[in-house]
Image (cartoon, rainbow, N blue to C red):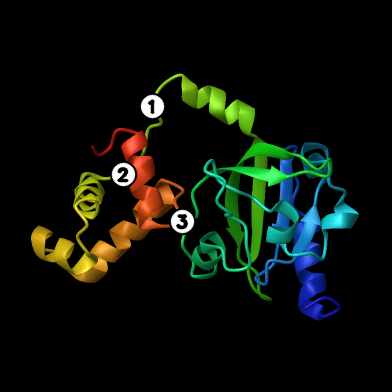
Amino acid sequence: MRGSRAWFILTAMADRIRSGDALIAFDRELQVVSWNHAAEQLTGIAATDAIGRPCWDVLRGIDDRGDLVCHVGCSGARLMREGWPVGCQVLQIATGRGTRKTVSVSTISVAGREGPLFVHLLKNGDEYESSENGGARRTRLTERQIEVLRLMAEGLPAKRIADRLGIAEPTVRNHIRAILVELSAHSQLEALAKARKLGLII
C-alpha cells in the first residue's frame, strides 16, 4: 500500500490527529502511518523506525502470562476490521532499549473515504495498575452477559447457552463478543480467567 494514493490520504489523516499522550496510527493492513513524539518518549522507538512497519512487529505486545498478543492475526485487529469496539488492554511492549514496558492501550477506529484508520493511545501502565490496585476493577457487563459468562464457565457452547436462557444463538454470540471486549480478552478462556480474577464468577 505504500506509495499509493490511499497511503498518502491515511498519512494525511494521521498527521491531523493530535494528542499529548503517546499515539500511533495504522491502516487496515496494520502498517504504522503515524508515531508521535510522545510515543517515541514512552517506547524509546523513533518514528523513523516504526512508520511503514506492521504495528505488531514494532510493539510485540504480550499479556501478563507472557502470551503473544500482537501478531499478524491478532483478534483485536479482526474485531476492528469488523467494526467491533476493542476494549482497553494492559500489555508489555518492546522498547527501543531492548526491554519491555507495561502500557495500557486504548484503540480508536476513524472512518475515512479511503478506508479505516486505527489509532492506539498508549499510557504508562504503572499509572493504570496503581489505579486498579485501589480496588476491584469495575466492569460494565449487563446482568444477561454475567449469566452468559457463568454458563460459559460451565463449559456450555453458544447453542446450549441459548437454549438454557431461551434466547437466539446469534444473540448469545453477540453477548460473548461484548464480554471479550469489556474484559479485554482475546479468547473465551482468557475471558473466564479474567472474570474469575475479578470475582465475577467462581
Q: Which numbered dot is residue 186?
A: 3
Amino acid marked by disc 1: Ala
**The residue tagged with tag 3: helix, strand or loop?**
loop
Q: Which numbered dot is residue 136?
A: 1
For label 3, the crowd category at 10 Å Cα-Cα, with few meaning under 14, some 14 to 19 and many 20 or more, is some
Q: Which numbered dot is residue 113?
A: none
Marks 3 and 1: which is nearer the front?
A: 3
**The residue tagged with tag 2: helix, strand or loop?**
loop
Amino acid marked by disc 3: His
- Which residue is pictured at 36% across the width and 44% down the height? 193
Distance CA(mark 3)–CA(mark 1): 21 Å
Residue hosting label 2? 141
Residue 113: name its quadrant: bottom right
Image side of residue 49 versus residue 195, left or right = right
Residue 105: name its quadrant: top right
Upstream in sequence: badge 1 or badge 2: 1
**The residue tagged with tag 1: helix, strand or loop?**
loop
Q: Position of residue 153 (x, y in %)?
A: 24, 50
Marks 1 and 2: which is nearer the front?
A: 1
Distance CA(mark 3)–CA(mark 2): 17 Å
Q: Position of residue 94 (x, y in %)?
A: 73, 46
